Amino acid sequence: ARHRPARPIHAGHPGQPRRAPRRR
């Protein structure tokens, strides 16, 4: 995990939890 930086939010919308991906 140290070799890998913090993974950014793919949704790009603040307030959207990672456990719940954007609904299509």
Image (spheres, rainbow, N blue to C red):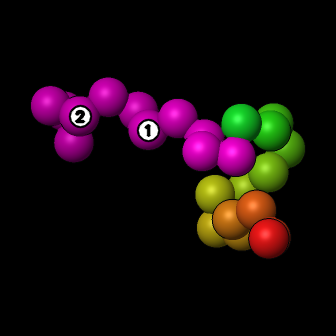
Classified by dominant secondary structure, the portion drawn in magenta counts as loop
Disc 2 and disc 1 in contact, CB within 8 angstroms: yes
Question: Which percent across, then down, holds residue 4?
Answer: 23, 34
Q: Which residues are magenta?
A: 1-11
Residue shown at 15% from the left, 31% from the top? 3
5 drawn magenta: yes
- What amino acid is at disc 1? Arg
Secondary structure found at label 1? loop
Badge 2 crowding class, 10 Å Cα cut-off, few under 14, some 14 to 19, many 20 or more, is few
Q: Is residue 21 left or right of residue 16?
A: left
Front position in the image: 7 or 10: 10
Residue shown at 71% from the left, 68% from the top? 20
Q: Is residue 4 left or right of residue 15?
A: left
* Residue at numbered disc 2: 4
- What amino acid is at disc 2? Arg
* Residue at numbered disc 1: 7
